[in-house]
Image (cartoon, rainbow, N blue to C red):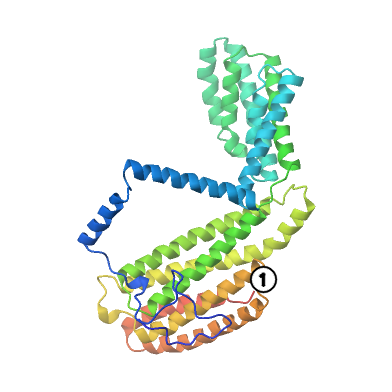
């Protein structure tokens, strides 16, 4: 396989192959690797066992690798902001909230069930301050519901076993009320605490007071001690989705320039579907970062989150369009090399070559656009983005003429090249309208 004969204009050198090494003349593309034979697979399996995999020594090595992975996560949490540090901080805050709630309930108020306050406090140190408030209200409502029904049922029926048989089904059923969210289960657990002791009005007041104390401590600690603001997680998720989108398009384009078949097309389709999942994860991260602005007392973090929300939402919207495009394109390519499709009905290389160039240019434009949105440091990124966008538009116009001419060669080509044109037009309109 030789280098791509089509010129690629722009501010960056020719993209590398999908595994990070430049193409060399005579080198074999990853997309043209054939399925290994049975003897080859058996030899590989024997070597795998010789190196200790699948044995006790191999499992010990696996545990050692997992230990090193935990060590790397600890170093990342210590080194700088990121997901690992957020987990550490929230875990320490939950422990602090539980300790403070227990200290107040046991040492100061002398509550008979002092564990209820820290139990409520620890579960209300949520990923955002808004979630702590919202789920705090839901949990207190569920606990109040379970306490009231258990006290009334236990007092009226007198027999704990009979009261459980009557009260618990009712509390569990009411716990599914949508207004309680996923906190409805706490109504049933609180009802159990009440029914297994001697229910009375005074005990019900104590349970509610202990629960309210835990809720106040949990929400207060989450709000006042390093309130969570998921700016870094949103940035990392968006950046990862952008990088995967560019790599996916480059991989498809590299494959279209070479000989490819059904296996390669299926691999592209699986990769496009993985891109779609990554984009959904990026949207969830952006939405979580937007939610972390609400009720957050840190003005500086609120200002930062408010500033990045519009561009992040816009790039995620474009990435969703790109992921849909990649899924549709790879599905079309997979269908063209299906066993039921004759070789004469497969796309011509003369049509795929400009389409590969178009994909390369779109991938470069996406990469530059992502760098603009996520705050890249390259001084020429804006100029490169404009240049790549114009190149992609010009290539799309040329591609439209090429594919229209191929489709006019016969009715069997209309559906195939028509699908290519529709997909390319959609990505130009939705993804490259300009930042």
Q: Residue 347's x, y, as percent?
A: 34, 81
Question: Residue drawn at (53%, 61%), measured in percent from left and top?
Answer: 279
> Considering only vertical position in the picture, is 99 above or below 386?
above
User: Which quadrant is the C terminus positioned in?
Assistant: bottom right
The answer to whether residue 209 of the structure is visible from this angle is no
Q: Residue 277's x, y, as percent?
A: 49, 58
Question: Residue drawn at (34%, 69%), measured in percent from left and top?
Answer: 264
Question: Residue drawn at (27%, 57%), measured in percent from left and top?
Answer: 44
Q: Tell me if 137 is positioned left or right of 7 in this view.
A: right
Q: Residue 48's x, y, as percent?
A: 30, 53
The answer to whether residue 375 of the structure is visible from this angle is yes
Q: Tell me if 21 is positioned left or right of 337 in this view.
A: right
**Disc 1 marks which residue?**
377
Q: Residue 202's x, y, as percent?
A: 71, 15
Q: Tell me if 177 is positioned left or right of 222 in this view.
A: left
Asked which secondary structure carries label 1, the reply is: loop
Viewer-nearest residue: 351 or 230? 230
Q: Quadrant of residue 207?
A: top right
> Considering only vertical position in the picture, is 435 above or below 60?
below
> Considering only vertical position in the picture, is 180 above or below 379?
above
For label 1, the crowd category at 10 Å Cα-Cα, with few meaning under 14, some 14 to 19 and many 20 or more, is: few
Question: Residue drawn at (20%, 60%), measured in percent from left and top?
Answer: 39
């Amino acid at each position: 396989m030789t280098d791509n004969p089509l010129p690629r204009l722009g501010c960056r050198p020719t993209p590398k192959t999908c595994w990070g090494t430049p193409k060399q003349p005579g080198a074999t593309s990853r997309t043209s690797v054939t399925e290994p034979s049975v003897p080859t697979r058996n030899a590989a399996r024997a070597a795998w066992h010789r190196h200790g995999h699948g044995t006790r020594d191999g499992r010990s090595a696996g545990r050692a690798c997992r230990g090193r992975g935990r060590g790397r996560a600890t170093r990342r949490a210590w080194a700088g902001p990121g997901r690992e540090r957020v987990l550490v901080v929230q875990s320490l805050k939950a422990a602090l909230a539980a300790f403070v709630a227990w200290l107040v309930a046991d040492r100061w108020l002398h509550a008979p069930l002092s564990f209820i306050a820290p139990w409520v406090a620890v579960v209300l140190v949520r990923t955002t301050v808004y979630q702590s408030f919202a789920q705090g209200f839901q949990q207190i409502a569920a606990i109040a519901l379970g306490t009231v029904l258990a006290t009334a049922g236990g007092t009226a029926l007198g027999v704990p076993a009979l009261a459980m048989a009557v009260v618990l089904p009712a509390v569990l059923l009411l716990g599914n009320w949508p207004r309680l969210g996923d906190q409805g289960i706490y109504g049933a657990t609180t009802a159990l605490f009440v029914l297994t002791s001697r229910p009375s009005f005074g005990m019900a007041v104590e349970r509610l007071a202990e629960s309210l104390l835990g809720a106040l401590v949990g929400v207060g600690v989450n709000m006042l001690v390093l309130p969570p603001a998921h700016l870094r997680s949103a940035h990392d998720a968006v950046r990862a989705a952008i990088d995967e989108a560019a790599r996916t398009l480059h991989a498809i384009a590299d494959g279209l320039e070479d000989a490819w078949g059904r296996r390669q097309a299926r691999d592209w389709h699986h990769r496009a579907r993985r891109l779609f999942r990554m984009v959904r994860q990026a949207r969830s991260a952006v939405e979580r970062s937007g939610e972390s602005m609400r009720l957050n007392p840190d003005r500086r973090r609120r200002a930062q989150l408010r500033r990045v929300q519009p561009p992040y939402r816009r790039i995620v919207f474009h990435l969703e369009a790109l992921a849909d495009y990649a899924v549709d394109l790879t599905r079309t390519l997979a269908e063209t090399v299906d066993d039921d499709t004759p070789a004469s009905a497969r796309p011509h290389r003369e049509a795929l070559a400009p389409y590969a160039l178009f994909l390369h240019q779109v991938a470069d434009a996406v990469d530059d656009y992502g760098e603009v949105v996520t705050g890249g440091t390259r001084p020429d990124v804006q100029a490169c983005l404009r240049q790549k966008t114009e190149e992609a538009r010009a290539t799309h116009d040329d591609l439209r003429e090429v594919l229209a001419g191929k489709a006019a060669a016969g009715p069997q080509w209309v559906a195939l090249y028509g699908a290519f044109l529709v997909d390319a037009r959609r990505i130009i309109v939705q993804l490259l309208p300009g930042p």
